Image (cartoon, helix red, strand yellow):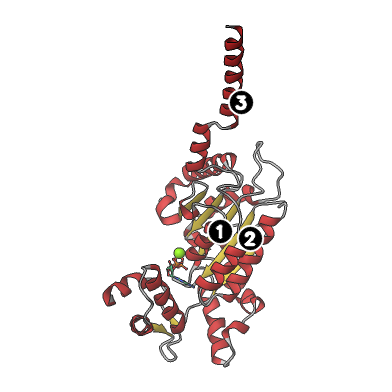
């Protein structure tokens, strides 16, 4: 009897050890449910490099800057959050590049609960409600970063955002150890805008006219005209804020206008994404449907690669 009791105790002890070592419920839960740990949030530098190279067309400057900025930030102990400001003509890949960054940090990519996209016109449409938006936005950011230090915030249509609202996120971007007990140092902020798109286009067109290879275009070539047009432009929301004078933006990332050959590449990529074998003839036809400017030279696509999906529907 005593032996049976002892055996039972031993069994219970082992069972307890096994249950503690392998709690099926929490293991299964964390297996399926995204959490802020390396299983779900882990930077893949080689993946980002490969994606930028193979998927983001015609953007050698943006690819280079993004890779350097994100890799440097993720592999070091940052003193402040990473702040990238992406500028350029419509349809040149600003949202697309943000998606590639998210895909290589979060297992769930843009669907991650740690990636937050704000679109000015959609989320903050009413200028009379700026005060309400300000406190909501600060509250959201604080809550999300408390939940996961590696949160990513993408602000689209930044040039349409009320300057007061931009100012309200400024404290989060600065060099503070902690704000009210929360550290923002590991967060990433990405601002998207068309501001400076015309200036970037001018510079790229001049370069094209001089017969030089687009890939020879260096950051210095676009940086000065870009800063003059964005930051000295009174119609630009960014102009009104001291994001710039306080050096809170770490990198300005120019997106160049896309040429016919890039639109062809976009069409080929879209066919591949749909599981079709890419047909150069179809891609060429689709790209020919796009309108190019300036009128005399027909170099750059007015819509970049935007609407490629619907244009392709017509051909296949
Ligand atoms: N440089 C590019 N390389 C590959 N695909 C691109 C590129 N630019 C645009 N695309 C394609 O076109 C679609 C629209 O581009 P995206 O939304 O990134 O443009 P955007 O720069 O954000 O434009 P907007 O300023 O109008 O918001 C992308 O989802 C992608 O499929
Ligand atoms: Mg966009």
Foreground residue among 265 and 292: 265
- Circles 2 and 3, Cβ within 8 Å, touching? The answer is no
Q: How many labels, in total? A: 3
What separation in Å lies between label 2 and label 3 (alpha carbons)? Answer: 43 Å
Q: Residue at x 51, y 50 (%)?
A: 115
Furthest-top residue in this view = 1
Split into 4 quadrants, where in the image is the C terminus? bottom left
**Disc 2: which residue:** 70
Foreground residue among 64 and 241: 64
Q: Alpha-carbon neighbours of circle 2 within 10 Å: few (<14), some, or many (≥20)? A: some
**Disc 1: which residue:** 104
Q: Quadrant of ligand 2?
A: bottom left
The image quadrant that residue 178 belongs to is: top right
Q: Position of residue 188 (x, y in %)?
A: 60, 53
SS of the residue under disc 1: loop
Of marks 2 and 1, the one in the foreground: 1
- Circles 2 and 1, Cβ within 8 Å, touching? The answer is yes
Residue 79's label in the rendered image is: none
CB of residue at label 3: within 8 Å of ligand 1?
no
Q: Earlier in the sequence, mark 2 or mark 3?
A: 3
SS of the residue under disc 3: helix
Of marks 2 and 3, the one in the foreground: 3
Q: Earlier in the sequence, mark 1 or mark 3?
A: 3
**Disc 3: which residue:** 17
Q: Position of residue 81 (x, y in %)?
A: 65, 52
Q: Alpha-carbon neighbours of circle 1 within 10 Å: few (<14), some, or many (≥20)? A: many
- Residue 177, placed above or below residue 81: above
Q: Alpha-carbon neighbours of circle 3 within 10 Å: few (<14), some, or many (≥20)? A: few
């Amino acid at each position: 009897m005593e032996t049976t009791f002892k055996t039972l105790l031993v069994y219970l002890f082992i069972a307890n050890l096994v249950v503690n070592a392998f709690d099926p419920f929490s293991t299964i839960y964390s297996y399926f449910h995204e959490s802020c740990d390396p299983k779900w949030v882990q930077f893949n530098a080689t993946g980002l490099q490969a994606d930028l190279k193979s998927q983001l067309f015609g953007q050698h400057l943006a690819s280079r800057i993004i890779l350097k900025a994100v890799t440097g930030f993720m592999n070091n102990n940052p003193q402040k959050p990473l702040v990238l400001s992406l500028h350029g003509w419509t349809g040149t890949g600003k949202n697309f590049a943000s998606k590639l960054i998210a895909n290589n940090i979060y297992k769930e990519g843009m669907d991650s609960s740690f990636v937050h996209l704000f679109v000015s016109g959609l989320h903050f449409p009413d200028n009379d409600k700026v005060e309400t938006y300000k406190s909501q936005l600060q509250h959201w950011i604080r809550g999300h970063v408390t939940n996961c230090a590696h949160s990513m915030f993408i602000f689209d249509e930044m040039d349409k955002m009320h300057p007061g609202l931009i100012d309200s996120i400024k404290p989060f971007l600065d060099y503070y150890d902690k704000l009210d007990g929360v550290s923002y140092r590991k967060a990433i902020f990405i601002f998207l805008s068309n501001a400076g798109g015309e200036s970037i286009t001018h510079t790229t067109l001049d370069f094209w006219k001089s017969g030089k290879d687009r890939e020879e275009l260096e950051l210095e070539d676009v940086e000065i005209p870009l800063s003059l047009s964005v930051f000295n432009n009174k119609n630009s929301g960014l102009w009104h804020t001291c994001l710039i004078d306080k050096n809170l933006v770490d990198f300005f990332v120019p997106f160049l206008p896309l040429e016919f050959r890039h639109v062809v590449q976009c069409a080929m990529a879209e066919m591949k994404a749909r599981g079709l074998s890419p047909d150069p003839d179809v891609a060429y036809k689709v790209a020919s449907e796009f309108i190019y400017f300036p009128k005399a030279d027909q170099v750059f696509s007015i819509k970049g690669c935007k609407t490629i999906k619907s244009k392709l529907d017509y051909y296949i």
